[in-house]
Each structure stands twice: as structure tokens, then as C-alpha cells.
Image: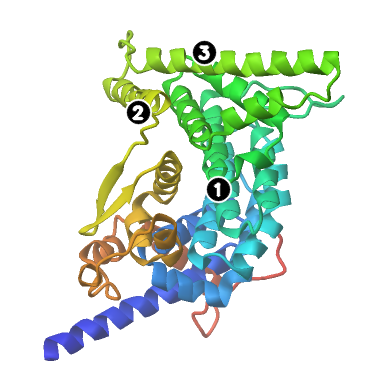
Amino acid sequence: MRSDRMSVSASEEVEFNKDSFLDEAVDALYEKRGSTREKALAVIIEAFNSNLQQGQQFVERKFATLLHQCLNSIKKGSSKEISLASHTIGLLALTVGPGDNAREILEESMIPLSQAFKSGSDPSKTASLLECMAVITFVGGNDPEDTEKSMQIIWQVVHPKLGSNVVAVKPSAAVITAVVSAWSFLLTTMDGWRLSPKLWQESITYLSSLLDKDDRSVRIAAGEALAVIFEMGSLEKFAAETKGSSDGSVSEGNKSKEGFSYIQGLKGKILNQVRDLSVEAGGKGSAKKDLNNQRNLFKDVLEFLEDCYSPTTSMKIGGDLLQTSSWSQLIQLNFLRCFLAGGFTKHMQENEFLQDIFGFTPNKRNLLGSEHMSNGEKRMYKSPNSALNKARTQLLNKQRMLSAGKNFGHYAVNVGDEDS
């Protein structure tokens, strides 16, 4: 009994420290020094990934403050700060789940995110912005119009609307991969009928062209996107719509036949491309793992195109099995797994929104004691080399400097200061 009391007491003390530390991190987002804000955002991300319950309790108190300080970072920060702030907003949306708060995140973030795409061309920053837009739309989008709007903004990163004072910049392979992945992720939530024939033709033609690119990550992203399109039956719908769109005139009838023939020809071309990529030989300097990933993916795509057989996957999460049986589920799982990274397991075990998405119900016995810190979490918070403790030390040093000459050790922040 004494041992239990000591354990609970230690846990409560750690929880208190973590809570106050998150408050300090959010306060640090008001600092003028960009590096201080970057460290604070890294702390918040690590804390949100390691303890979902703690994050949920924290955002109940500081939701609006955290959102708007992150948006300020996106408007005024460096590329690194923008990347961290974007990731934080995405985590915030997944933490609060669907509802009014998620809706507010989407509405408040759309303009700052859209403008941030136009400032600079750092690939990692752009990728973080794309992931953020995809995640907040996935959680906070109430209707198909929201999703379609975000998909259009994402698509324009590689297909910008050119004006008299806009110069087309060729996107890097990393940016193309991020665009296609984010677009595909949102496509999994859409009804293919909603998208216009013009958009289908443009997107399918573009994705087919990406299968011929040198970069393997681009080819894989394009293959996954095309798999979702075929699974939705969207190519067939588009072809049928094109075939039946004639108003009866000879010219319109010829256009419809040409459009239908084009789509059928494009489908045959994609099938040949997929077949070639499923058996591609390794070239000079080719990474074996990447090559195997490509072959495996396109074998699955080929099997689906020829036999309508969707890939099934399963993975262990804390002793429980999470399974997928469609391309849409697989794309969603891979995207969220990549976005959450080290926090994926924790979110799948405790985040009801994600559990509903994948039909995943963790066994209660595997979650016993989850309200207490795991050994890994204890190491994370106690280790002097952890990112959290390094940032904590730096923030506390800053706090001591700001508190010098005062009679109390409170983190002093001038809320009126503007970010640099």
C-alpha cells in the first residue's frame, strides 16, 4: 500500500510539472526571439505526442491562445518555426477531435496557410503546411465543399494560377510527393461524383505523368493516388459521364467520343506503367528498400486493377490488431502514421476519433495503467538528453533571467510584444 501511495504521489507530481511546463511553453510563444518560440513549439509537440489525456486537458484551458500564437508563427516566423507551428495546429485538431473547436481551427487557419504557401520555397516548410491543411480539413471539414476547397489549394501548389506578376517555379520532388499525398488523403473522404470532369482529367493525366518521373517517392505517391481513384470508380464514372455528355449535335458528339477514347487510352497507359513499375530492376545507386517498396506497392495496384483485389494489412498496436481492407483506409493510415510519428501508438490507443475512423477498439487490459506514465515517458521527462528536458532547461534559464530582481519566480511575459 505504501508503495502504491508513493507511485501515485510521484505520478501526480510529474503530471503537475508537465502541466505547468506546457503553460510556460505557450507563454514562450509570445517571446520576440524566434529560436525561443521554436523550442517552445517543439516542447508542445513532444508533450502532445506523449500524453493525449494531458493534451486534451490542456487545450480545454488554452485552446484559443495556442491556436492564435501558432497562426502568428506561421505569419511571421522562419521556415523552421512555420513547420513546427503547422505541425502543432494539426496535432491540436487531432487532439480536440471533430466539433466546434476543430471547425474553428479550419476556418481560422485557411488564409494564413494559403498565404504561407506563397512565401518562400523551402520544401520541408511546404510539406508541413500541406500536412497541416490536410489534417485540419480531415478533422474539421463539415461538408464536401470544405474538403474540395482544401484539395484545390493543395493542388495549386504544383499547378499555380499564373497571373501577370506570378512566375511559375518548378516544384521539387519532395514538394510534389507531399502535395500528392495530402491530396490523396483528402480524396479518400470524397464522393468522386462531386469533382468536375475537367478536374478528373487534369489530375489523372498529371498523376500518370508522375509515374514516369525519376524520383521513386513521387512515383509511389502517384501510384497510391491512382489506386484510390480506381477504387472509387472515378475513372469509369468520368469516362461514362464524358461518353454521355453530348447534347445531340454532331460536334458535341465527336468531342464526347474523343473524350471517352482519351480516358480509355489513359487507363490502358496507366495499366502498362503500373505493370512496368511492379517489376522494375534496380538501377545504379538505387536503394534496395525503396525499390522493394515500389515493387510491392505497384504489385498491389496491378492486382487491384486486374482482379479488383484490395490489399489487406494488419499491424499490432499495444497488443491489439489494427486492420485495413481498402486503399482508402491504407492511405489514411499511412498518412496519419507519418504525421503523428512517435505519437501514433498513443493516439491510436486513446484518441476516440482515430479509433472510430479505423474501427479500432483497444483491449482494456492493454490500457491498464495508461493514466500513469509509461517507462518510456518517464525516461523522456527524466533524461537530461531528451528534447523536452533540454528545452525545459533553456526555458527555465530564460525565466530566471527575466525574473532577476523580482520577489517571485513567475514566468514574466509581455503580452503586448509582437513576434519578430
Determine whether 341 is above or below 409 in the image: above
Q: Spatial distance from mark 3 to mark 1, Cα to Cα?
A: 27 Å
Query: Which element type, helix, strand or loop, lies under badge 3?
Result: helix
Q: Which residue is drawn at 40% across and 27% down?
A: 301
Q: In this view, does 80 lie to the left or right of 14?
A: right
Q: Residue 269 bears which disc, if any?
A: 3
- In-front residue for pair 307/99: 307
Indicate how the structure is coloured in the image: rainbow
Determine whether 25 is above or below 303 in the image: below
Q: Residue 300 bears which disc, if any?
A: 2
Question: Disc 3 residue type?
Answer: Lys
- In-front residue for pair 158/112: 158
Residue at mark 1: 189
Determine whether 158 is above or below 33 in the image: above
Q: In this view, does 246 lie to the left or right of 183?
A: right
Q: Spatial distance from mark 2 to mark 3, Cα to Cα?
A: 17 Å
